[in-house]
Amino acid sequence: MKFLTALMIVICCERAVASEFKIPEVGELPRIDRRSPRPASEVLRNSAYILKFKEHAPIGDGYVILTDHSEEDYLRSLEKLVKHRKATLIKVEDLAKLYQPRSIHSLRNRLVTLKPKYVALAPRQESYRENMLLGAWELLTTLDDDPYLDVFPGILVAPSPEIFTALIDRTIRYRAITANELRPFAISQVASNEETRSLQKAGVLRKVFASHGIETPTLAVYTPRATEAPELKGEKSWKIRLSRKGDFVKEFAPELSEVLRAARLVIMHGHGIPGMSCSVDIEGIPIDSRNAVILSGSCFSAAPTESDFPRMTSAPGGYKVAPRPAFATQYIERGATVFFGHMRLSSGFPHLYPVLEKWLSGATVGEAYQQLINGIIDLRGFQSGRYVVKQPANRRRLPQNALLYSIFGDPAIMPFESLTAEAAK
């Protein structure tokens, strides 16, 4: 608990103060867990640290799919995945009520018997909500005696049977992206002359990929308050300056659009609301893009259509929260196979980067997801019985918000071939 109190108040919605713009090497950023000394205030304010992951071996080698779909079209697609993964399909009445004693006890016993390595949650669109995810953590952390997730999880969700079928078909065909095919693209939002941490993270990513001989095109979107903010230099570094508060980018210049369209990996840092991430509206993403893996550090990038938590009318950055489809589900509709996001208030880079780092080492979707949630459980001291919010208080920031990261994708997919292994060839 040495720095936890400070960490809880220095989250994505805090306004940054003026400081020298510096792009550190990723190795200079402290790795943080529960036992770490309290970082400097500037480190917390600028999100210039990385969460330490917590490894925990899964309880077995199997693959289980939990779903509350009853429509034949959805079930037909899931049966394809069952065959592909040699999985067990378990149907429940309502994944949104997974945490209820009648459901959770029988499921726990079934999973302990099946001993899965991977568990894919395939909820109906209306079941995908905060307590569904928190109920899953309650279930999946109690398959043995320690407080950590005992399987590698993933979420398979789409707004229609047709989009779900296309997602499952892409999943089955998916092959790990090699270093030669990677083509990353980094998008950052510069909110003001002082708030430049998202731009800094794009620079950090550029250095990380450059160390592997990979070029990273970048886009920085400047809000009207960022009149004198710094810029990233170099080739393939684009800038868009918005003229009015609340404007979003809905169309890119042809050259930039082509580069974004060709990217296999897109990483975004900045503020967001449903349907918008880093001042980029989902309408601006090319429909026929090759964007296979997307990581968004924005708030609400994977927001549910129905919420168990108190409604928020405003978001960090001064944006109004409107009832739009989530950026994540719309990106899946546009052809993405894996999406990292958050249901509500995201901590951005400190939790996003270690997921990306793990994937770039050759880990599966579910392994990185498990170690992220286990790292947060370890950091915050969550235990069984403290996950689900059954009677939400009228508070903006509930402790369980920290656990609401969503990773859409088959947990057994390996997004990338290991960059280290590629370099050794």
Image (cartoon, rainbow, N blue to C red):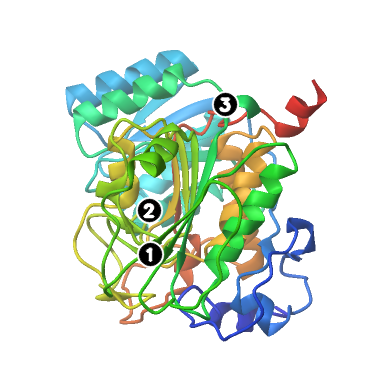
Circle 1 SS class:
loop
Q: Residue at x 58, y 47 (%)?
A: 235
- Image quadrant holding the N terminus, namely bottom right
Q: Earlier in the sequence, mark 1 or mark 3?
A: 3
Q: Are marks 2 and 1 in contact (CB under 8 Å)?
A: no
Give the labeled residue for mark 3. 181
Q: Classify residue 308 by image quadrant.
A: bottom left
Q: Classify residue 398 by image quadrant.
A: bottom left
Question: Residue 320: where, in percent of width, then height?
Answer: 25, 73
User: From what the image shows, is residue 103 above or below residue 231?
Assistant: above
Q: Residue at x 73, y 82 (%)?
A: 40
Q: Earlier in the sequence, mark 2 or mark 3?
A: 2
Q: CA distance from mark 2 to mark 3?
A: 47 Å
Q: Earlier in the sequence, mark 2 or mark 1?
A: 2
Q: Residue at x 41, y 47 (%)?
A: 104
Q: Nearer the viewer, mark 2 or mark 1?
A: 1
Mark linked to residue 344: 1
Give the labeled residue for mark 2. 101
Q: Nearer the viewer, residue 360 or 223?
A: 223
Q: Nearer the viewer, residue 310 or 244?
A: 244
Label 1 sits on what residue type? Arg
Circle 3 SS class:
helix
